Amino acid sequence: MKNAYFCIPFQGISFMKILVCISVVPDTTTKITFTDNNTKFNTSGVQFIINPYDELALTKALDIAEPAGGTVTVIHVGGAESEPSIRKALSMGATDAIRINADATDAYFVASQIAAVAKTHAYDMILTGRESIDYNGAAVCSLLGEMLQIPSINVITKLDLDGNNVIVEHDIDGGREVLNTTLPFVGSAQKDLCEPRIPNMRGIMAARTKPLQVLEPAAAVSSGNYANFELPAAKSGVKLIDAENAGDLIQMLRNEAKVI
Amino acid sequence: MSIIVFAEIADQQFKKATLEAVTYAKMLAQKTNSSVVAVAIGNVSDAGLLGQYGANEVVTVAAADSFNAEVYSDILAQVAKDKAATVLVISNSYAGKSISGRVAVKLRASLATNVVDVPDTSAGFKVKRGVFSGKAFGWVNLDAAIKVLAITPNSFEPQNTGGTATVTAYSGSIAQAQTSVVSVNKVSGKIPLTEAEIVVSGGRGMKGPENWGMIEELANVLGGATACSKPVSDMNWRPHSEHVGQTGITIKPNLYIAVGISGAIQHLAGVSSSKVIVAINKDPEAPFFKAADYGIVGDAFEILPKIIAAAKAAKA
Ligand SMILES: Cc1cc2nc3c(=O)[nH]c(=O)nc-3n(C[C@H](O)[C@H](O)[C@H](O)COP(=O)(O)OP(=O)(O)OC[C@H]3O[C@@H](n4cnc5c(N)ncnc54)[C@H](O)[C@@H]3O)c2cc1C
């Protein structure tokens, strides 16, 4: 059963209302370290950015909504320190933004917050990134699908709409698949979906005055909390093989490393 | 009490990731005194095989072979309730990731994806998962009575202990799918990158797509899969599905051979969990040598033929 909270847009008249979930993550060049006895991620000196996959989700949402006169709302669960990233999403073209003022403790908690908002708005489509590159949960899309009782399709590489009909190409294990579903649905963006938009000057100016609503969190649970973190064991040092005798590598991999 | 395993099938055979998941469930079952129940949806030639890896029961479901997140997660949740499951073990594959969230919500369970080790059950239930795209690990305490764990392929060696399982037919209901498959394009006969034990990967140093024959040949001789760095897929030398790294796929093979790849932090994030890393690069200062176990400094176009010849000779 489709969720009754969603209104199905009129056939042909596609006034799309899209919600895009944005996570804010350390820049990809960040060297990861921890503090407080390895219990907290060390944010000192870290530059934060919109999760790269979420930029794809947002770009696709804008590409769909703009020609049809639709709206794109971005939603983020996090503290006020994320607002520059939210403003960037607005400068890319989002209509408005919602920030849920809470620590994004885990995917379950984040999805619960977003679902609580989605239940009171009639979004036709919700897009997320494939995964957040900080905690790599890759879970918000399917969590939202179940919480809202709508189809969820992960790792989307192509997305086309025809009225209420949705044609989606997405990655599956060992290949790709084309699926057919109907609005509303939730999907997660994979790299080939589109090229991320770069905000222009007009977008940046416009973003300053676009609405950014701050909501207090709904009551929700998280799956648990991090006890501690650790870094991968350091390599003991590289063993160099002379290029002339490169073939020796095979014997070493077989007899010494025992991996072939 | 039971531990449920989602048994993934490809070409009517259980995938290696499934054998890993059953082995994992067995390790956990011994700690918690539970039985292991595998759920196999679709056609499989030998359902009882999972007994050898530690399953006590295999529930077979005569549903459509084509994977559907809503339908499959509903079946898993029904079996989990029926068998009083405390833990569900799912592979962290694309299919696994698309159902683990849905199942967790249905069962009001705690969810942990990207799990790389057996839980610490000495006080509560704590699992180790990969975070920051392979740059670190985090131990997370899971609070709910039921836990859904999606485990990273190649984290556990499947162990055939020679047991047997009873095979029973699923008696629950099958939900109506709201999503239908239009077409499937599977690269058959190729090992999916995330499951490959050996990966040969090329970077911009390979100069152009026309030179990938050597990468593919070495992968073939070693029985591995091929991968590439981000610029290589950005330039369309190789498909995006081969792009590894922080914004691509994270892999964990036993052997990763990087050819003409500099070793940028974003690339290393996706491959540094590999057991053994070989770097081949003409630049002795390439950062990859700091992350590698074996290194060869020199021209890939001269080095690769030597390695391929040696690999062929070793195989002969
Ligand atoms: C937001 C963001 C996300 C990113 N995500 C990823 C990611 O997920 N994955 C990823 O791979 N990158 C990623 N990158 C890009 C990353 O920073 C590097 O630019 C990229 O990994 C470099 O690819 P490369 O090593 O193939 O090419 P280069 O850096 O150009 O290196 C080529 C190497 O080949 C060597 N070489 C050249 N000729 C030969 C020869 N004949 N024989 C042997 N060696 C030779 C050179 O010495 C050099 O070391 C990301 C970057 C950003 C900004």
Image (tube, helix red, strand yellow):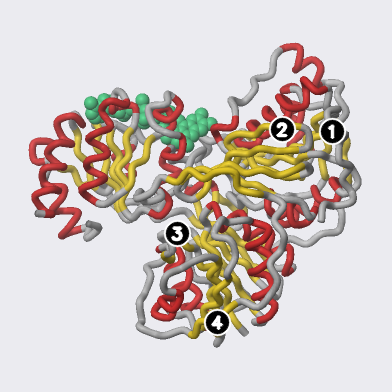
How many discs mark residues in the rendered view?
Answer: 4
Tell me the SS state at disc 3.
Answer: strand
Q: Residue at (18%, 36%) from the top-left corner? A: B304
The residue indicated by pointer 2 is A161
Residue type pointed to by label 3: Ala
Q: Residues within 10 Å of mark 2 (few under 14, many from 20)?
A: some
Instruction: Please report whichever mark, 1 or 2, sits nearer to the chain's N-terminal start.
Output: 1
In this view of the protein, which residue sits in the foreground, A101 or B217? B217
Residue type pointed to by label 1: Gln
Chain under label 3? B
Residue type pointed to by label 2: Leu
In this view of the protein, which residue sits in the foreground, A33 or B256? B256
The residue indicated by pointer 3 is B10
Figure quadrant of the N terminus of chain B:
bottom right
- How far separated are the C-alphas under marks 1 and 3? 39 Å
The residue indicated by pointer 4 is B168
Tell me the SS state at disc 1.
Answer: loop
Q: Residues within 10 Å of mark 1 (few under 14, many from 20)?
A: few
Q: Is residue A257 left or right of residue B264?
A: left
- How far separated are the C-alphas under marks 1 and 2? 11 Å
Is B132 drawn above or below residue A14 in the view shown? below
Figure quadrant of the C terminus of chain B:
bottom left
x and y percent of residue A100 in the render?
Answer: 82, 44
